[in-house]
Image (cartoon, helix red, strand yellow):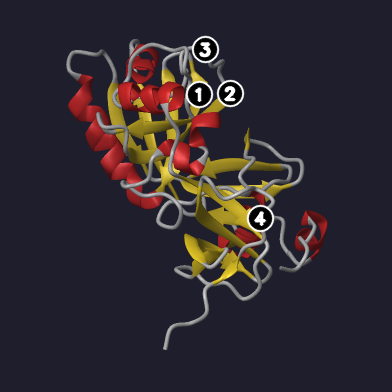
Amino acid sequence: MPGPVPTLNRMATIASTLFRLNRGYVAVTGPEAGDFLERMLSNEVVSLQPGEARPALLLTPKGRIIAPLRVVREGPDAFLLITEAELAEPVASALTRGRFAAKCEVETKLYRGYLQLGPGEGVRNDDYGVEAYETWAEADRDAADSNELEALRIEAGTPAWGKELDENVLPAEAGLDETHISFTKGCYPGQEPVARLHYRGHPNRQLRVLDLKNASPGDEVVYEDKVVGRVTSAVPGKALAYVRREVPAEARLHLSPPRP
């Protein structure tokens, strides 16, 4: 396996500093918006101050992922949930079904999302392993395609919806239990299976950043002549893959030979 490519080298290949993000937005507003989201999401919400943001998950009762979110508190009674574009409607629908008598409104917003590498305005975004800030607005701006950031995302080990994340992935498999979940807050849908796995067990596989040459999504990862994982995302020299938990972190892994 080749050695790792430093983040600074990755940054040197990026020509732009402003990128367009394929985001979806759901606004939750009203006097009980904070308490409602505290009951529905996996991370603490009511402790956010206006202008602050925190990652969270919207889960099924069985602990499966409906959507990864970034929760932004825009005001005392106003929150904006940032997710992937295709997940905004499912998030709004799930929250509306769970609202019952809560005094709040749920609606999607047609904003455009942007990421600024380096110092900037907005909320901090750590998905790419470098200083970056995320903003949103109705106005269109001249920005580069976020596909140019793929190498940074992979090197940072950040899972993406449709690649590392879907409705079949457990949060702990992708490492989201360390960033998107509070184990001290009150109840929310999916809390019981998530807490049970955290305190009494462990996932059978884990998302890892691997130094692999010429990998492609779907390639099998081999250790000691056994298939132990599968690549989910890749760029030259780096890949993300789900690997069996028992494989040592320092193990030398390689790709399975192509099948005839």
The residues bearing labels 2 and 1 have C-alpha atoms spaced at a distance of: 6 Å
Left or right of residue 40: residue 136: right
- For the residues labelled 2 and 1, say whether their Cβ atoms are less than 8 Å apart: yes
Residue 35 x, y percent position in the rendering: 36, 12
Q: Nearer the viewer, mark 2 or mark 4?
A: 4
Residue underneath mark 3? 47
The residues bearing labels 3 and 1 have C-alpha atoms spaced at a distance of: 13 Å
Residue underneath mark 2? 51
The earlier-in-sequence mark between 4 and 1 is 1
Q: Which picture quadrant has residue 3?
A: bottom right
The crowding category of the residue bearing disc 2, from other C-alpha atoms within 10 Å (few below 14, some 14 to 19, many at least 20), is few
Left or right of residue 254: residue 119: right
The earlier-in-sequence mark between 2 and 1 is 2
- Residue occupying the point 62% across, 76% down: 214
- Residue occupying the point 71% across, 68% down: 1
Give the SS element for disc 3: loop
Quadrant of the rendering where the C terminus is positioned: bottom left
Residue 166 x, y percent position in the rendering: 36, 49
The earlier-in-sequence mark between 2 and 4 is 2
Kind of residue sitting beneath label 4: Ala
Give the SS element for disc 2: loop
Residue underneath mark 4? 251
Residue 122 disc label: none
Residue underneath mark 1? 74
Give the SS element for disc 1: strand
Kind of residue sitting beneath label 3: Ser
Kind of residue sitting beneath label 1: Glu
The earlier-in-sequence mark between 3 and 1 is 3
Give the SS element for disc 4: loop
Q: Nearer the viewer, mark 4 or mark 1?
A: 4
